[in-house]
Image: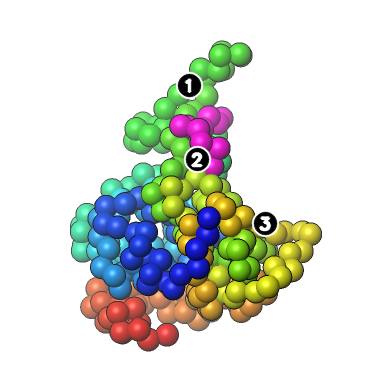
């Protein structure tokens, strides 16, 4: 059952070194505030999962908190590469990183399987590709009904899943509006789930379209974190800070510039 906590309390209670974490969000509602709190608390040796890693994971990788990344597409949307990810992958700075790459379709199936409590997902998406030759987590299974050979991928079952949303009520029921992504699947698949929200309200005011209500019984911690998705956007609350995404390219290219940014804007507490 959901418990209201401060962000430092939620992270210190539920996130530990060596865990597998998912900080999901698609285009908007990316849980930057939670990710930065993980860095402030000095967590290390983390295995991260996300369908579309962008700036937040670039920051966590550059800070030396990550040992493994399971993902599909990764980049700075509309701008270019994730230079801290590239530096870790190509040069081992600040530490080597293990990559487990999949397609978008496979990642979505892996989340759905985890949410359903299944050990793996089956799909046709890898037919005709060579990814299975370089990724041992892409295997095959034969359908017992049709004898069709399908791709098989392990379900996502992270130790902790973290998402951001618009509103939550006193009982910890959470409303996600706009692009709902895999918020529901992350909460259901994770052993522990943390949800940060823009505001605590008496009435969720849930619309009938493009929304999901995450029930409080499926959530462990709820945190009020206004602007907790910045510089991504929160539908209905604030727009995407496109200027920051553009500026990140120059910041992240240089190790010194990145470390200065990290010290000032994460560890120094600047907005």
| Residue 218 in picture, x, y percent from top left | 55, 51
Which residue occupies the foreground of this view, 74 or 3? Answer: 3
Q: Residue at x 61, y 68 (%)?
A: 170
C-alpha separation, residue under disc 3 versus residue under disc 1: 33 Å
Q: Earlier in the sequence, mark 3 or mark 2?
A: 2
Q: Residues within 10 Å of mark 1 (few under 14, many from 20)?
A: some
Q: Which residue is mark 3?
A: 212
Task: Report if residue 119 lies within the magenta region.
Answer: yes
| Quarter of image, res 63 | bottom left
Q: Which residues are magenta?
A: 114-124
For label 3, the crowd category at 10 Å Cα-Cα, with few meaning under 14, some 14 to 19 and many 20 or more, is many
Question: Magenta span has 14?
Answer: no
Q: Residue at x 37, y 59 (%)?
A: 14
Q: Nearer the viewer, residue 158 or 218?
A: 218
Q: How is the image coloured?
A: rainbow
- Mark 2 and mark 1 lie on one chain; the one further toward the N terminus is 2
- Please determine whether, in this image, residue 243 is positioned above or below residue 204: below
Q: Is residue 171 above or below residue 48?
A: below
The part of the image, by quadrant, that contains residue 181 is bottom right
In this view of the protein, can residue 226 be seen by the observer? yes
Q: Position of residue 29 (x, y in %)?
A: 55, 66
**Circle 2 is placed at which residue position?**
114
Q: Position of residue 208 (x, y in %)?
A: 79, 59
């Amino acid at each position: 059952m959901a418990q209201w906590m401060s962000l430092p309390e939620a992270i210190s209670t539920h996130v530990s070194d060596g865990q597998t974490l998912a900080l999901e969000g698609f285009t908007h509602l990316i849980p930057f505030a939670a990710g930065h709190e993980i860095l402030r608390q000095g967590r290390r040796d983390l295995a991260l999962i996300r369908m579309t890693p962008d700036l937040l994971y670039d920051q966590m990788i550059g800070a030396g908190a990550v040992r493994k990344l399971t993902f599909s597409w990764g980049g700075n949307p509309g701008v270019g590469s994730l230079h801290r990810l590239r530096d870790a992958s190509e040069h081992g700075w600040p530490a080597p990183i293990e990559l487990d790459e999949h397609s978008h379709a496979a990642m979505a199936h892996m989340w759905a399987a985890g949410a359903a409590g299944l050990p793996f997902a089956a799909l046709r998406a890898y037919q005709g590709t060579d990814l299975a030759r370089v990724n041992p987590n892409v295997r095959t299974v034969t359908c017992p009904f049709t004898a069709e050979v399908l791709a098989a991928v392990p379900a996502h079952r992270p130790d902790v899943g973290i998402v951001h949303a618009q509103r939550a009520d006193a009982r910890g029921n959470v409303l996600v509006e706009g692009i709902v992504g895999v918020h529901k699947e992350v909460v259901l698949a994770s052993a522990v789930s943390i949800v940060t929200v823009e505001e605590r309200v008496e009435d969720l005011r849930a619309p009938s379209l493009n929304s999901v209500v995450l029930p409080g019984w499926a959530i462990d911690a709820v945190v009020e974190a206004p602007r907790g998705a910045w510089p991504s956007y929160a539908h209905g609350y604030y727009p995407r800070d496109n200027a920051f995404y553009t500026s990140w390219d120059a910041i992240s290219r240089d190790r010194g510039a990145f470390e200065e940014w990290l010290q000032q804007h994460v560890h120094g507490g600047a907005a």
